[in-house]
Amino acid sequence: EAQLVESGGGLVHTGGSLRLSCAASGFTFDDYVIGWFRQAPGKEREAVSAIDRSTGRTYYKDSVRGRFTISSENAKNTVYLQMNNLNAGDTAAYYCAAAGSRHLLTTGWDLTLFYHSAYRGQGTQVAVSS
């Protein structure tokens, strides 16, 4: 069975760091764009970052650019999201999603994750306290 499993969430203080992992099983990442979106209680979901495994191109939401780094480790079929200098606005449930890279030809990376994901994880909670 193909699935994505997230890990690495937790509670940190403002300014702290966390690294989220998204491990795939049952399929390989090669032709997918893998990314993270988040949703806080009472707020709209928002795409945070993504990496197109077919080209290596990365994408970031403006508010996390320079603080978050997305990367992939092919041998482990895993994508990571390194999150530094966290603040209260980053508090949310974070979900990993995988969509076919072909969708990027006609759809932005954020909408590709929202509407064309073939696989989604169960989510991991990130909480940042002041």
Image (spheres, rainbow, N blue to C red):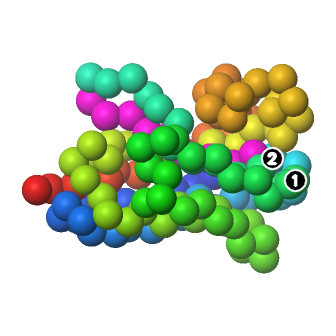
Q: Quadrant of the C terminus?
A: bottom left
Q: Callout 2, which amino acid?
A: Tyr
User: What stretch of residues is rendered in magenta?
Assistant: 33-41
- Residue 36 in the image: x percent, y percent? 55, 46
Left or right: residue 6 compared with residue 38: right
Label number found at residue 32: 2
The residue shown at (30%, 58%) is: 86
Is residue 115 one of those drawn in magenta? Answer: no
Quick check: can you spot residue 20?
no
Q: Secondary structure at mark 1?
A: loop
User: What's the magenta bit mostly, secondary-structure-wise?
Assistant: strand
Quick check: can you spot residue 109?
yes
The answer to whether residue 48 is above or below residue 77 is above
Q: Nearer the viewer, residue 36 or 86?
A: 86
- Residue 14 in the image: x percent, y percent? 19, 61
Left or right: residue 57 compared with residue 66: right
Q: Nearer the viewer, mark 2 or mark 1?
A: 1
Q: Callout 1, which amino acid?
A: Ser
Q: How many residues crowd around disc 1 within 10 Å: few (fewer than 14), some, or many (20 or more)?
A: some
The residue shown at (32%, 47%) is: 90
The answer to whether residue 29 is above or below residue 40 is below
The residue shown at (49%, 52%) is: 65
As measured in the structure, the alpha-carbon distance from the residue carrying label 2 to the one carrying label 1 is 7 Å
- Residue 115 in the image: x percent, y percent? 67, 23
- Residue 60 in the image: x percent, y percent? 57, 46
The residue shown at (79%, 58%) is: 56
Q: Which quadrant of the structure image shows residue 101?
A: top right
Label number found at residue 54: 1
Q: Secondary structure at mark 2?
A: strand
Is residue 39 one of those drawn in magenta? Answer: yes
